[in-house]
Image (cartoon, rainbow, N blue to C red):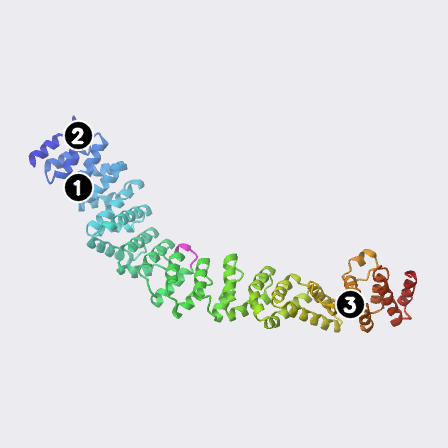
């Protein structure tokens, strides 16, 4: 072996071609053993003029653990590039003196080279006694990131003993420290913990799922715990998961929701999911709605009703559909429809309620009609229309009867303006019969401006209604006018004047003027009615 080594060493001479020198260095790294001559030759090769020879010498020095190569390796490390990275790895392989040198150099080299040193120390840590794994607690985030990346790549190849060593180091770094780990270190420790599949790390992870730990660290902890939480965890862990799911940072929300969503639903979880219906993130609300949205309890209904104005249209519709499936939910929707001030919200609620109003129209009429009536009397058509729509879809005839009864009651109280508002709603129904249209025409006449101008009369809806009923049954109309005490001389004169000039209903107009003369014979309007009758003969 000695003779063979010396012959190979001779091939490293500067007079030899580059390819020969490089190959010789590689061979020495494989067969050199503890030969002093080999060590000296390789140290010398570290100063070769050719980068390829130097790079192979670096690797050989690390493989043979040549301690006297450390100063030269330190120089190569400072150069950076492929040589710098290889020099860091080689230095770490040399042993305690090598790792001591790396720790000394860690913050003396430029920031770009620290990644090489950190990665080498991390790999040396799992290969040694674990002390060099303290690099994970370094103050430089780039150093921590390099160490974590190196360990992640190494984990699949670690032996059981090395995995245990790394687990012990993570527990040591994550617990019992007087000062808290920096965010990068915290996240790195938890990321590694999640890859080790060692349940001894669970307490460390649970401890870090809540503030004040940084969001990324919390997210890493939750992701790691996800592989161990199969059933329903203990009370403290459940509360932590619900708190995380209600967080404003989706990095934390997502893994917590994943665990909660796959848990079998039971009473222990109900309160937590109800609270999640108020979570900032819509994803959390959706999961909660899928878990408890079908429960017919007041707590669930109140929480769901708070969602009916959510800006997300699809989610809002899902909430409405869920509420409509339970008795308390439907009552809550009815209450919301009565109380909401927004026309858009009212329409959304009304459309959801339609199938249920159709199933029990009378009950819903009792619930909703007073609200619609109040809006109609106030002239708030935009608010009344959604409520009227829901009732009309339930029973058109039932709504028509209630509107007519309300209008009739108001006429009896001589509240003609309010009654007229109900008649305007009734006029939208093409199926209203003769009696309703006659009452509507009379009330409309009472509130009319009674402007005798041709154009004004052409736009008067009450005259249009009288034309319809008079064409159908003049006698009935005249009888109604005669027995209606609140229609005065001015009302009758205006009506008779208009139709006396109408080619189709001139006779009806004349009869109305005659009725005026009969009821108010000594008045000025009666005299005008007589003159009008003479002029139209």
Q: Viewer-nearest of labels 1 and 2?
A: 2
Residue 63 numbered tag: 1
Q: Nearer the viewer, mark 3 or mark 2?
A: 3
Q: Which residue is mark 3?
A: 442
Which residues make up the magenta segment? 247-251
In the rendered view, would you say 44 is above or below 411?
Answer: above
Quarter of the image with the C terminus in it: bottom right
SS label for mark 3: helix
- Would you name the residue on which mark 2 appears? 20
Identify the residue at the far front of this view: 472
On residue 355, the disc is none
**Does the residue at mark 3 contact the one at mark 2 (Cβ under 8 Å)?**
no
Q: Is 254 or 320 nearer to us in this picture? A: 320
Q: Does the magenta run of residues contain 252? A: no
- Residue 408 x %, y %: 72, 72
* Residue 276 is at least partly visible in this image: no
Few, some or many residues within 10 Å of mark 2 (<14, 14–19, 20+)? some
What residue lies at 19% left-to-right and 44% top-to-bottom?
93
Q: Report how far apart the C-alphas of labels 1 and 2 lie in the structure.
A: 20 Å
Is there any visible trace of residue 145 in the rendered image? Answer: yes
């Amino acid at each position: 072996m000695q003779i063979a080594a010396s012959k190979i060493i001779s091939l490293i001479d500067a007079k030899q071609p580059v390819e020969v020198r490089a190959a010789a260095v590689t061979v020495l790294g494989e067969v050199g053993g503890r030969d002093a001559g080999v060590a000296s030759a390789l140290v010398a090769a570290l100063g070769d003029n050719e980068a390829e020879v130097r790079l192979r010498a670096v690797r050989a020095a690390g493989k043979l653990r040549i301690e006297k190569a450390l100063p030269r390796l330190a120089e190569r490390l400072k150069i950076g590039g492929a040589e710098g990275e290889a020099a860091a790895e080689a230095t770490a392989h040399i042993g305690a003196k090598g790792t001591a040198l790396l720790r000394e150099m860690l913050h003396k080299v430029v920031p770009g080279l620290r990644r090489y040193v950190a990665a080498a120390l991390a790999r040396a840590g799992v290969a040694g006694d674990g002390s060099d794994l303290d690099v994970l607690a370094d103050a430089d985030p780039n150093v921590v990131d390099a160490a974590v990346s190196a360990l992640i790549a190494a984990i699949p190849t670690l032996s059981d003993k090395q995995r245990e060593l790394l687990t012990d180091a993570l527990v040591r770094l994550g617990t019992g420290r007087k000062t808290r780990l920096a965010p990068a270190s915290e996240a790195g420790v938890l990321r590694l913990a999640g890859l080790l599949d060692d349940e001894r790390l669970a307490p460390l992870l649970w401890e870090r799922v809540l503030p004040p730990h940084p969001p990324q660290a919390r997210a890493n902890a939750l992701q790691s715990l996800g592989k161990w939480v199969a059933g329903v965890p203990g009370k403290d862990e459940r509360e932590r998961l619900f708190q995380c799911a209600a967080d404003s940072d989706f990095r934390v929300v997502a893994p917590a929701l994943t665990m909660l969503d796959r848990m079998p639903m039971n009473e222990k979880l109900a309160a937590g999911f109800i609270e999640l219906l108020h979570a900032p993130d819509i994803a959390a609300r959706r999961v909660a709605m899928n878990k408890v949205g079908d429960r017919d309890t007041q707590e669930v209904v109140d929480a769901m009703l708070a969602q009916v104005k959510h800006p997300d249209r699809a989610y809002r519709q899902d909430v409405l559909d869920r509420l409509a499936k339970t008795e308390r939910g439907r009552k809550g929707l009815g209450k919301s429809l009565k109380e909401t001030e927004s026309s858009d919200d009212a329409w959304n609620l009304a459309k959801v309620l339609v199938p249920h109003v159709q199933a029990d129209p009378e009950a819903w009429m009792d619930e909703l009609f007073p609200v619609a009536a109040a809006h109609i009397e106030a002239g708030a058509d935009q608010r009344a229309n959604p409520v009227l729509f829901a009732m009309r879809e339930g029973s058109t005839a039932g709504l028509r009867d209630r509107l007519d009864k309300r209008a009739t009651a108001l006429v009896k109280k001589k509240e003609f303006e309010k009654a007229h508002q109900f008649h305007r709603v009734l006029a939208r129904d093409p199926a209203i019969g003769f009696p309703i249209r006659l009452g509507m025409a009379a009330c409309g006449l009472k509130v009319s401006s009674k402007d005798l101008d041709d154009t004004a009369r052409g736009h008067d809806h009450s005259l249009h209604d009288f034309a319809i009923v008079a064409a159908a049954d003049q006698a009935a109309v005249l009888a109604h006018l005669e027995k209606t005490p609140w229609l005065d001389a001015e009302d009758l004169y205006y009506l008779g004047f208009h139709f006396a000039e109408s080619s189709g209903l001139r006779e009806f107009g004349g009869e109305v003027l005659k009725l005026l003369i009969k009821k108010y014979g000594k008045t000025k309007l009666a005299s005008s009615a007589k003159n009008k009758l003479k002029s139209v003969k």
